[in-house]
Image (cartoon, rainbow, N blue to C red):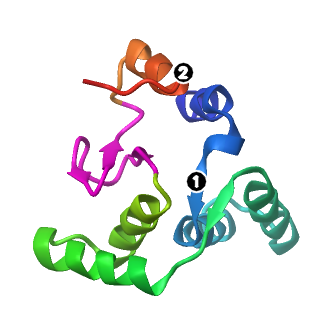
């Protein structure tokens, strides 16, 4: 948790793209496993949507997601997140559940929990990893 929070603060919420699918998945987690009330849940999701760059699901990103499902056997909702991130121009996507290092359409999936402190600092500063 500390790693995730420090990355969010270092990158700055105003630079974070928030695909609609991630908001929905977070809301579900907050209710089922996080123990948050409906009111707290709504407030937290609304805060993130206000602080970050929310990205709706478009027809184009859904079509791109279907390509990911077909070509790389992604789960559909993971593919939607990757496609929406690509459509929004994200350079990387943090995920501990998807394949670390996978590159597609300008987006690289990174597991922040296996990156070195130096790599996390580089990303926070807007530099790319090699």
Does the magenta run of residues contain 20?
A: no
Q: Quadrant of residue 13?
A: top right
Q: Dot 1: what SS? A: strand
Residue under label 2: 125
Residue 31 in the image, given as x and y percentages of width and height: 68, 70
Residue 95 in the image, given as x and y percentages of width and height: 40, 48
Q: Quadrant of residue 79?
A: bottom left
Classed neighbour count for the residue bearing mark 1: other residues with Cα under 10 Å, few (<14), some (14–19), many (≥20)? many
Q: Dot 2: what SS? A: loop
Left or right, residue 44 beside residue 17: right
Q: Is tag 2's residue or tag 1's residue first in the polypeptide sequence?
A: 1
Q: Which residues are magenta?
A: 90-113
Q: Nearer the viewer, residue 6 or 18?
A: 18
Classed neighbour count for the residue bearing mark 2: other residues with Cα under 10 Å, few (<14), some (14–19), many (≥20)? few
Residue under label 1: 17
Residue 67, disc: none
- In whole angstroms, how far apart are the C-alphas of marks 2 and 1? 16 Å
The residue lying at 40 percent from left, 44 percent from top is 92
Q: Nearer the viewer, residue 112 or 41?
A: 112
Left or right, residue 112 beside residue 75: right
Q: 46 above or below 10?
A: below
Does the magenta run of residues contain 111?
A: yes
Residue 34 in the image, given as x and y percentages of width and height: 66, 58
Quadrant of the frame with the C terminus? top left
The residue lying at 41 percent from left, 76 percent from top is 61
Q: 52 above or below 22?
A: above
């Amino acid at each position: 948790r500390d790693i995730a929070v420090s990355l969010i603060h270092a990158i700055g919420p105003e630079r974070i793209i928030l695909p609609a699918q991630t908001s929905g998945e977070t809301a579900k987690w907050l209710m089922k496993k996080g123990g948050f009330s409906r009111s707290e849940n709504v407030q937290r999701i609304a805060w993130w949507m206000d602080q970050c760059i929310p990205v709706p699901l478009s027809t184009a990103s859904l079509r791109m997601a279907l390509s990911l499902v077909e070509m790389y056997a992604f789960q559909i909702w993971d593919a939607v997140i990757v496609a929406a991130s690509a459509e929004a121009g994200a350079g990387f996507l943090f995920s501990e559940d998807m394949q670390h290092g996978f590159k597609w359409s300008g987006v690289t999936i990174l597991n922040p929990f296996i990156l070195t402190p130096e790599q996390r600092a580089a990303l926070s500063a807007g530099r790319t990893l090699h």
